[in-house]
């Protein structure tokens, strides 16, 4: 009898452990604002905003079709795409083709004149003939794919890829980078920086709101500031920044980015730009991709990951083909499409966002996140990058190793589901207890009061 009672108690103990484990398996699923209860007390502090940091990583010189035009599910390269060799010709001479590693580093031109010729009054058939170097003009039709850009394509699978994000200006890198911080090209029509750029920027708005910011630049500071440095970092041409030591000190080497993340000191807004690894031709795209990968991996391994939105995009098309006709915004036709990926725990996993966006959407996003006033009509009228954000979804877990698989968003369990599991566990345990007691009473070997025989070990 004692042995059978021990068996019954053992069964009950196992049932209790299993029931508790079943409940814990649901309760410990990570959730936004982990640690908060379903019914917070009235005196509990308000939950922190889902996004507390914005990082803008701006690389250089590639069109959307050049990087993602063959990706499934996007507005990519049309099946019948073809370009003539001669201006205004209607012949089909050069079709899109996969680039070799050497061809991917061709030194194409992408100034205002070339871009206008490529667009050719909306015909989008001048990409080859627009290049002054006819020997490499046909290279403009080349593209890279997921085998060449495996990390970027994996980011697109795990987070949100925009397939209608346009450079705001047709005039090159500097005007677009100025738009990214000031929501205006300031009248610039080339990459020649003026003696001084005097226009309000998003950093003025941040300073007025006592919000922190930094501009991280690869290879900074140079021995002497060149035109190329000013193109990549327009703040270096702004006396309002360079003339104030406290503000000038916020332009730092990109190595400081990793230090700030490790110390938990990432500012509210960060801009990051490569130089030797900016991806602009004739630089190797793979080196730029590796640079961006270190930035994203460091973020994912930091405490800031849970509250950050990182936007990876490009300053202009680099002279590469893109079939999408640039829209006219505010009476001005914008530049060609460029790649853009939003990396965040709250980005829509594996989602292709077709919202029409442009470079002015970058300061608009920062203004929206931190409640800042608009800089110009350009950012005020821009559609929102935040269409790619869902703060109610289960946050995407960091994955430092690149993966081609789409992220799996586990739905947050409802509170009712948790209580239902509690109930089922206890009801099941009660039924098993009742069944065991019935067997105990009916089994004559158990219910007999006679003591065990000496030969029967207990």
Image: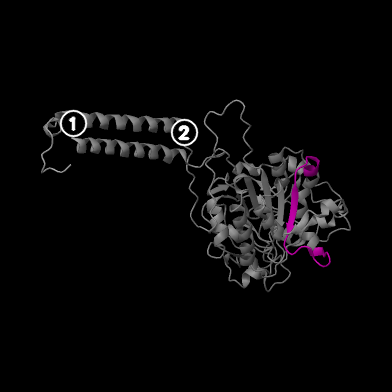
> What percent of the width, then of the height, locates residue 163?
60, 51
Q: Is residue 296 rendered magenta in the image?
A: no
- Magenta range is 205-228
Q: Residue furthest front?
A: 454
State the residue at coordinates (55%, 35%).
36
Nearest the viewer among 2 and 253 is 2
> What percent of the width, then of the height, locates residue 234?
80, 56
Q: Residues within 10 Å of mark 2 (few under 14, many from 20)?
A: few
Question: To which quarter of the image does residue 391 belong?
Answer: top right
**Where 238 sits versus 1, above or below?**
below
Quarter of the image with the C terminus is top left
Quarter of the image with the N terminus is top left
Say which residue label 1 marks.
440
State the SS at label 2.
loop
Q: Whole-Å distance between the Cαs marked 1 and 2?
A: 40 Å
Horizontal side, residue 327 vs residue 445: left or right: right
> What percent of the width, then of the height, locates residue 256?
71, 58
Say which residue label 2 marks.
414
State the residue at coordinates (66%, 62%).
320
Count of marks, rendered view: 2
Q: Is residue 217 rendered magenta in the image?
A: yes
Badges 1 and 2: C-beta atoms under 8 Å apart?
no
Horizontal side, residue 408 vs residue 81: left or right: left
> What percent of the width, then of the height, locates residue 375?
79, 42
State the residue at coordinates (46%, 36%).
413
Question: To which quarter of the image does residue 438 belong?
Answer: top left
Q: In the rendered image, is residue 14 in sight? A: yes
First reached walking from the N terminus: tag 1 or tag 2: 2
């Amino acid at each position: 009898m004692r042995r059978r009672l021990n068996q019954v108690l053992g069964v009950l103990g196992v049932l209790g452990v299993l029931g508790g484990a079943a409940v814990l398996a649901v309760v410990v699923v990570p959730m936004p604002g982990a640690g908060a209860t379903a019914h917070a007390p009235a005196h509990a502090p308000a939950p922190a905003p889902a996004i507390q940091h914005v990082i803008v990583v701006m690389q250089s010189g590639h069109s959307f079709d050049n990087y993602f035009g063959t990706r499934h599910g996007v507005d990519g390269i049309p099946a019948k795409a073809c370009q003539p060799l001669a201006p205004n010709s209607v012949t089909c001479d050069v079709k899109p083709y996969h680039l070799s590693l050497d061809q991917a580093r061709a030194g194409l031109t992408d100034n205002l004149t070339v871009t206008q010729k490529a667009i050719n009054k909306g015909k989008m058939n001048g990409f080859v003939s627009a290049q002054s170097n006819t020997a490499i003009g046909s290279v403009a039709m080349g593209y890279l794919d997921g085998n060449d850009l495996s990390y970027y394509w994996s980011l697109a699978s795990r987070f949100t890829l925009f397939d209608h994000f346009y450079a705001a200006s047709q005039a090159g890198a500097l005007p677009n980078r100025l738009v990214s911080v000031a929501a205006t090209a300031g009248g610039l029509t080339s990459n020649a920086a003026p003696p001084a750029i005097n226009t309000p920027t998003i950093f003025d708005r941040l300073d007025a709101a006592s919000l922190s910011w930094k501009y991280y630049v690869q290879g900074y500071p140079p021995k002497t500031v060149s035109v190329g440095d000013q193109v990549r970092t327009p703040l270096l041409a702004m006396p309002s920044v360079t003339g104030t030591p406290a503000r000038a000190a916020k332009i730092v080497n990109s190595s400081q980015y990793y230090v700030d993340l490790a110390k938990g000191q990432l500012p509210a807004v960060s801009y990051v730009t490569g130089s030797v690894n900016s991806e602009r031709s004739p630089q190797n795209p793979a080196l730029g991709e590796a640079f961006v990968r270190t930035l994203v991996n460091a973020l994912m391994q930091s405490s800031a990951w849970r509250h950050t939105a990182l936007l990876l995009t490009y300053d202009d098309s680099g002279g590469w083909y893109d079939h999408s006709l640039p829209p006219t915004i505010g009476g001005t036709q914008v530049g060609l499409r460029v790649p853009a990926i939003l990396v965040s725990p709250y980005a829509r996993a594996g989602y292709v966002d077709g919202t029409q966006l442009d470079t002015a959407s970058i300061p608009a996003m920062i203004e929206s996140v931190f409640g800042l006033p608009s800089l110009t009509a350009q950012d005020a009228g821009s559609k929102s990058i935040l269409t790619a954000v869902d703060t109610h979804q289960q946050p995407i877990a960091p994955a430092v190793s690149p993966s081609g698989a789409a992220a799996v968003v586990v739905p947050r369990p409802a509170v009712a589901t948790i209580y239902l599991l509690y109930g089922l566990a206890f009801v099941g345990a009660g039924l098993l207890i009742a069944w065991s007691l019935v067997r105990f009473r009916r089994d004559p070997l158990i219910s007999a009061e006679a003591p065990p025989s000496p030969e029967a070990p207990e």
